[in-house]
């Protein structure tokens, strides 16, 4: 399976995973507390510059963002349909800035670091008997790990359609994508249980 992590020595790589996640949460709060277009545009420029500084080639950096950018544009269009243009633009800028910083965090943080931090955050809930912290960390790690795999599989299915001269439609692409992803999920779950990573509670 692929990984979203990119080797490098940028200052984002040198920051601890905890610090990056705290800044990400803080940035999200700040972005949603302001509706000033100029401030949000500056935030987009700053986070965009940060994202391009992590060491990815320009084309590869843009390619990673395509699925998320499409989702943001859809949200902006729906927002424009029910709100004034100012509100739609604010939503677009907020989500873009947050997405760019989140992409920077993901590209400079290993899966193990993510899992360790999430597990630590879930410890208080474990002491309350609500969850198992290790299971929460493992679940988040698997989700992050699966993202590039799902994107790659989507592109492969789409290219297969185009090679056969078939029209690419959401139904003909999403159905096989979901089936293949669920099969992988079953195989991974079986492998995890076979290695005794999870404790079964009766």
Image (spheres, rainbow, N blue to C red):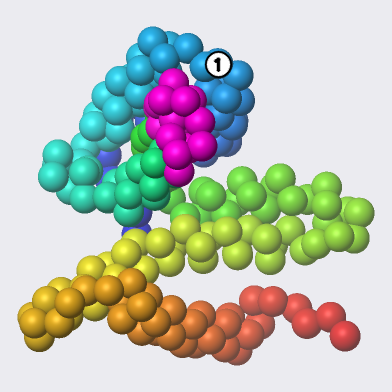
Secondary structure mostly taken by the magenta-highlighted segment of the chain: helix
User: Which residue occupies 84% across, 80% down?
Assistant: 201
Q: Is residue 62 left or right of residue 81?
A: left
Q: In this view of the protein, which residue sits in the foreground, 131 or 13?
A: 131
> Quarter of the image containing the N terminus?
bottom left
Q: In this view of the protein, which residue sits in the foreground, 193 or 86?
A: 86
Q: Is residue 66 left or right of residue 117?
A: left
User: Which residue occupies 8% across, 82% down?
Assistant: 165
Q: In this view of the protein, which residue sits in the foreground, 114 or 47?
A: 47
Q: Quadrant of residue 98?
A: top left
Which structural element holds mark 1? loop
55 versus 87 height, above or below: below
Q: In this view of the protein, which residue sits in the foreground, 25 or 71?
A: 71
Q: Which residues are magenta?
A: 78-95
Is residue 88 part of the magenta span, yes or no?
yes
67 versus 172 height, above or below: above
Q: Please indicate, yes or no, whether residue 142 appears anywhere in the rendered image.
A: yes
> Residue 35's x, y, as percent?
52, 17
> Residue 6's x, y, as percent?
29, 47
**Which residue is disc 1 drawn over?**
34
32 versus 102 height, above or below: above
């Amino acid at each position: 399976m692929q990984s979203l992590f990119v080797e490098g020595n940028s200052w984002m790589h040198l920051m601890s995973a905890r610090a990056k996640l705290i800044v990400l949460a803080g940035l999200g709060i700040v972005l949603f507390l302001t509706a000033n277009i100029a401030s949000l545009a500056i935030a987009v420029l700053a986070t965009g510059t940060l994202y391009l500084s992590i060491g990815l080639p320009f084309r590869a950096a843009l390619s990673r963002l395509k699925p998320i950018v499409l989702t943001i544009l859809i949200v902006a269009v729906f927002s424009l349909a029910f709100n004034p243009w100012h509100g739609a633009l604010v939503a677009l800028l907020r989500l873009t800035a947050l997405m760019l910083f989140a992409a920077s965090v993901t590209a400079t943080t290993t899966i193990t670091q993510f899992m360790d931090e999430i597990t630590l955050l879930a410890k208080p809930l474990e002491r309350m008997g609500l969850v198992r912290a290790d299971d929460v960390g493992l679940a988040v790690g698997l989700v992050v790990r699966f993202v590039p795999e799902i994107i790659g599989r989507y592109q492969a299915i789409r290219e297969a359609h185009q090679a056969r001269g078939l029209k690419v439609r959401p139904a003909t692409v999403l159905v096989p994508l979901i089936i293949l992803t669920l099969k992988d999920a079953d195989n991974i779950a079986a492998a995890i249980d076979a290695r005794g990573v999870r404790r079964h509670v009766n």
